Image (cartoon, rainbow, N blue to C red):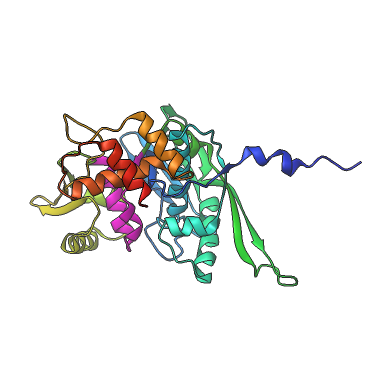
C-alpha cells in the first residue's frame, strides 16, 4: 500500500491569495517601530531600538537585514488576508500566491531580474530575526521570531534546466506575531501610491505619517525623534537634508511636509478621500448593494472597489446622487 498523500491533506491548510485589487494594508506595529533597513545594499548591522517601554532588537542573516522594499511582500499578504476576512472567508498564516500577481500589485518589475530580487527578498525576510516586547493584537509578549517563518518557490522547469524555469507559485508562512496582528485587525490602509515611492526613507516617513497623523489635520515631530523612529543610519545633519529634499519634492501620498522652527517637521493632511459617511459627507450604500456588486465581480476586493468609487465621486466634485446604489453598480458594470 502507498503511504498517505500528506501534501493533499494539507491543501486546506493554505489560504489562496486570489483577491484582485485588494486595498494595501500594513500592520500597526511595524509602522510604528523601525524593523526594516532603509539601505538598498546588504545591511548587516544589529539594530537596537527603545521607545516608550518597547524594546526591539533586529539581527540580520548573512544576506543582510530585510529592507523596506522587502516589506512589500508582507503588505501584499496582509492585504489579501484582510480582504478575505472582510468577505467572511477563513484564513490561515500559510499562504499560497502567484508571484506575478504579487509583483503587479506592489508595482514591481516582472522581468527576470525582478523575480530574482523577489527570491532574495524572501531570503532576507526569513533570515532577519526580531526580539521584542511590543504588543500585537492586545498581547504583549517578549519573543523572538522571523518576519516570515518559511517560504517555497515552485517553478515550471524545462527538462534538464533545473532552477531556470518560470516561477509559478509561492508558498509563505507568516510569523504568529504578524498573523495575530491580522486577526485582531491591527492594520491601516495605505495609499496605492505607496508602491510608487522610489526612496526607502519616503516610504518610511509616509508610514509614520499614516500611523500618527492619520485623518487628523496635522502632526508634529522633532527631527531627531523622526530620525530615530525612521531607522535612519545617517548623521542628523544628513537626515535633515534628505527630509528637506522630500519637502521640496512634495509627492508623498496623502500628506505634505513642512519644516518649522525648533527643528520640527509638520505633517499636514492633503485633500482626503471620503471613505465613510459622516454627517452626510458621503453616499451610503445598502448591504444588499455590496452583495450584488460582489456577485458582479467575483474574486475582487469589493471594499477596495467601493473606496475607488468614492474617490472618483469625491474628485468629480461630490455631485448629488439620486441613487448611490444604482450609481455604484453602474460604475462596477463598466469596469
* Residue sitting at x 13%, y 52%: 263
Could you tell me if residue 196 is visible in this image? yes
Residue closer to the observer: 142 or 309 = 309
Residue closer to the observer: 115 or 137 = 115
Residue 197 percent coordinates (x, y): 31, 60
User: Of all residues shown, which one is farthest toward the left?
Assistant: 261
What's the magenta region? Answer: 188-212
Q: Which SS does the magenta portion mostly show? A: helix
Examine the image and state in which quarter residue 51 appears: top left
Could you tell me if residue 189 is visible in this image? no
Q: Indicate left or right for 164 with 275 as reference.
A: right
Residue 239 percent coordinates (x, y): 24, 59
* Residue sitting at x 65%, y 61%: 155
Residue 93 percent coordinates (x, y): 55, 39
Q: Indicate left or right for 9 with 285 as reference.
A: right
Residue 332 percent coordinates (x, y): 36, 46
Magenta stretch holds residue 208 = yes
User: Of all residues shown, which one is farthest toward the right?
Assistant: 1
Residue closer to the observer: 168 or 140 = 168
Quick one: quadrant of the N terminus?
top right
Instruction: Name above or below for residue 91 compared with residue 330.
Output: above
| Number of numbered tags placed on the structure image | 0
Residue closer to the observer: 279 or 62 = 279
* Residue sitting at x 52%, y 40%: 144
Magenta stretch holds residue 121 = no
Q: Indicate left or right for 294 with 127 as reference.
A: left
Instruction: Name above or below for residue 309 compared with residue 62.
Output: above
Amino acid at each position: 500500500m502507498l503511504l498517505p498523500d500528506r501534501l493533499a491533506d494539507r491543501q486546506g491548510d493554505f489560504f489562496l491569495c486570489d483577491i484582485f485589487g485588494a486595498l494595501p494594508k500594513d500592520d500597526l506595529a511595524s509602522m510604528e517601530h523601525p524593523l526594516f533597513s532603509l539601505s538598498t545594499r546588504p545591511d548587516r548591522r544589529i539594530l537596537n531600538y527603545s521607545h516608550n517601554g518597547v524594546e526591539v532588537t533586529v539581527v540580520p542573516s548573512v544576506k543582510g537585514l530585510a529592507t523596506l522594499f522587502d516589506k512589500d511582500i508582507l503588505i501584499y499578504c496582509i492585504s489579501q488576508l484582510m480582504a478575505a476576512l472582510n468577505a467572511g472567508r477563513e484564513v490561515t498564516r500559510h499562504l499560497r500566491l502567484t508571484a506575478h500577481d504579487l509583483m503587479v500589485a506592489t508595482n514591481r518589475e516582472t522581468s527576470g531580474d525582478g523575480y530574482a530580487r523577489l527570491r532574495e527578498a524572501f531570503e532576507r525576510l526569513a533570515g532577519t530575526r526580531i526580539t521584542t516586547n511590543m504588543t500585537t493584537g492586545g498581547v504583549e509578549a517578549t519573543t523572538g521570531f522571523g518576519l516570515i517563518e518559511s517560504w517555497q518557490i515552485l517553478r515550471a522547469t524545462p527538462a534538464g534546466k533545473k532552477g531556470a524555469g518560470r516561477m509559478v507559485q509561492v508558498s509563505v508562512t507568516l510569523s504568529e506575531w504578524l498573523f495575530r496582528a491580522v486577526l485582531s485587525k491591527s492594520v491601516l490602509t495605505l495609499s496605492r501610491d505607496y508602491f510608487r515611492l522610489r526612496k526607502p526613507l519616503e516610504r518610511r516617513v509616509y508610514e509614520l505619517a499614516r500611523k500618527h497623523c492619520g485623518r487628523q489635520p496635522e502632526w508634529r515631530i522633532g527631527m531627531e525623534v523622526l530620525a530615530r523612529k525612521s531607522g535612519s543610519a545617517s548623521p542628523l545633519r544628513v537626515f535633515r537634508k534628505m527630509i528637506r529634499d522630500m519637502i521640496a519634492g512634495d509627492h508623498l501620498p496623502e500628506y505634505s511636509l513642512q519644516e518649522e522652527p525648533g527643528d520640527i517637521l509638520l505633517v499636514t493632511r492633503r485633500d482626503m478621500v471620503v471613505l465613510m459617511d459622516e454627517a452626510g459627507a458621503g453616499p451610503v450604500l445598502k448591504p444588499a448593494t455590496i452583495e450584488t456588486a460582489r456577485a458582479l465581480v467575483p474574486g475582487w476586493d469589493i471594499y477596495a472597489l467601493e473606496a475607488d468609487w468614492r474617490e472618483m465621486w469625491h474628485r468629480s466634485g461630490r455631485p448629488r446622487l439620486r441613487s448611490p446604489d444604482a450609481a455604484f453598480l453602474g460604475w462596477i458594470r463598466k469596469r
